[in-house]
Image (cartoon, coloured by chain):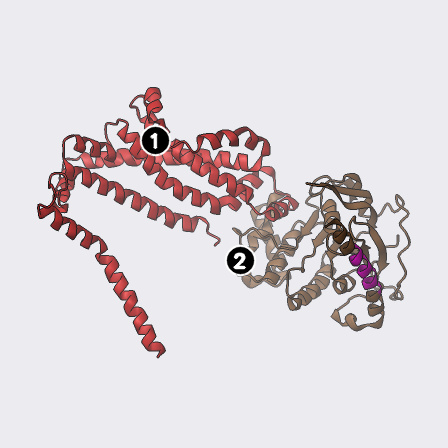
Amino acid sequence: MSTGRHNRATTAGRLSVLVGALSVPAFVGVWELIARSRIVNAVLFPPPSTVAVAVLDWIHSGQFFGDLSASLFRVTVGFLIGTAGGIMLGVLTGRFRLVSSLLSPLFHILRPIPPIAFVPIVILWFGLSEAGKLFLVVWGVFFTVWLATHIGVQKVDRGLVRAALMLGTPRRQMLSEIILLGALPYIVVGLRTAVSISFYTLVAAELAGAFAGIVYRIEIAQQNMQTGQVMGGLAALGLLSFVADRSFAAIAERAVWWR
Amino acid sequence: MVAMMYNPLRPTPPLRLVDAAPEPSSTAPEAIIRVEDLSIVFDVPRGEVIAVDRVSLAVMPGEFVSLVGPSGCGKSTLLNAMAGLERPFEGEVMVAGKPMLSPRPDIGMVFQQPHLFPWKSVRRNIAHGPRALGKSKTEALRIADDLIDMIGLTKFANAYPHTLSGGMQQRVAIARALANQPRVLLMDEPFGALDAQTRAVMQDNLLELRDRINATIVFVTHDIDEAILLSDRVLIMSAGPGRILRDLSVGLPRPRSSAILTDPAYLALKRDCLDLIRTEGRKAFEQMEAVT
């Protein structure tokens, strides 16, 4: 009886794995069929085969790796700067009331403004330079990480702090070890959100005007009516942020190593 | 004030149920902990609460003193003041001749919860104090390993706290507090969160441990049995505002074990304590009723 139920369960499990593996190919297949059936305009809605050709061309022309590295550079450097600033100030505002009174009201007003809204002023300030793109990514990442750290620091078990105090822990070690590691589970959640935010802001930054980058390539292709290239760019962006999110999740799991 | 240290060369003194002689404050220079007219007041939304009300007491070096009283009587606050975690509103707390205004590494503390650093192994938790005080890593780990052997957790030296049971975690917390070789060990209901069986084992462990370390211990509990079993002296506190109601010497011979729990002298002492606490508990309850 129980074996039967067990078998049924594994059968259901296998079936769902199979369906899961077929999900994307089936979607691509249906898309190909519809695009080729002439129900839709093939120029605006090219079949996946056309998209694949466009992507191969992109790679062969040598532009792909230039675009990829330009985008990756903006996302990575922007993420690192925003994260460093966010964690540092989050520890300070979370731990010191005076610093919090000084900065938190300001941050809470600035934080909800969507980073994309800063594009016009960023162009005025930085022109089309790389600094402007980094600014946007840093801006988006910073507030998310700051808030997560701020909350995390405030939620650090007071008992841990007291225990550390009783053991003679010096002030610096208190901040850099007890407070920071105590808040780490919260910080890691903030960092993961910040990964996807860095991709949102990357899009805004590159649409605002750039000379290379995946989103820049999408925009150029759109102006040339190369719909296949547009979709190829979207697929590349999707894949990139998917990989970034997944690898970050894997890192995050190990970051809080004591769990 | 007479120090109630057990002296193996002298015959055990007869059990005394009388109150210890009242404290002639300012004469007993040898006391390691001296609390004088201490009051601690907390700000609450509806005004102020007096947690500790003009308490004076002295603890002699090597003594084991318990603070007992109904919950909310300020016994933990009093202990925190001895730890330097709570500032006096009035009066003074002196430990080893110096006023307590902030925590000091010569005073160790064990809390009701173990509060181990979850990111550190047992070894490194215990080594934390010596490291913080500037000892070399090798030296700190050596101290830790000795203590781990002492608490019988050798097999778990590299385990992380969350993999240990509550009793084991609390043993690590005690070892961690001892790693700085404190002159005074403060314990705030350290076994309060443990089940009855583990608690009994921990009490026996503490009695053994006490013979091997050279620290004065102040122990907060609401468990009368625990207080009498472990202590040289039991201070019974009144319901809030906290005051010391009675200072009882426990004249039971050492080494002790849970066997004394059925000793008639022990039972008499316990009855005495319980009567006091029950009266106080009722008062506290009526006070709370009156407020609400």
- For the residue pair B199 and B284, the one nearer the viewer reads as B284
Q: Is residue A142 magenta?
A: no
Disc 1 residue type?
Ile
Q: Which chain is red?
A: A
The answer to whether A105 is drawn above or below residue A196 in the figure is: above
Answer with left or right where residue B36 lies relative to residue A14: right
Write the residue at 49% across / 35% down: A88
The residue at 21%/57% (across/down) is A22
Q: Is residue A198 left or right of residue B194?
A: left
Q: Position of residue A210 (x, y in %)?
A: 25, 27
**Residue A96 location in percent, x, y?**
58, 34
Residue A10 shows in this picture: yes
- Snapshot quadrant of residue B212: bottom right
Q: Which residue is nearer to you in this view: A231 or A149?
A: A231
Question: Is A211 above or below relative to B30?
Answer: above
Specify the label residue A87 is tagged with: none
Q: Which residues are magenta?
A: B272-283
Q: Position of residue A257 (x, y in %)?
A: 46, 51
Count of all numbered marks drawn on residues in the image: 2
What is the display colour for chain B?
A: brown
SS for dot 1: helix
Q: Chain of mark 2?
A: B
Q: Secondary structure at mark 2?
A: helix
Please state which of residues A213 and A254 is positioned toward the viewer in this rendering: A213
Q: Quadrant of residue A227?
A: top left
Which circle, 1 or 2, is nearer the viewer?
A: 1
Q: Residues within 10 Å of mark 2 (few under 14, many from 20)?
A: some
Residue underneath mark 1: A116
* Callout 2 amino acid: His
The residue drawn where x is 66% and y is 49% is: B180
| Residue B162: image tag | 2
Q: In the image, residue A19 lies at what x, y percent?
A: 24, 60
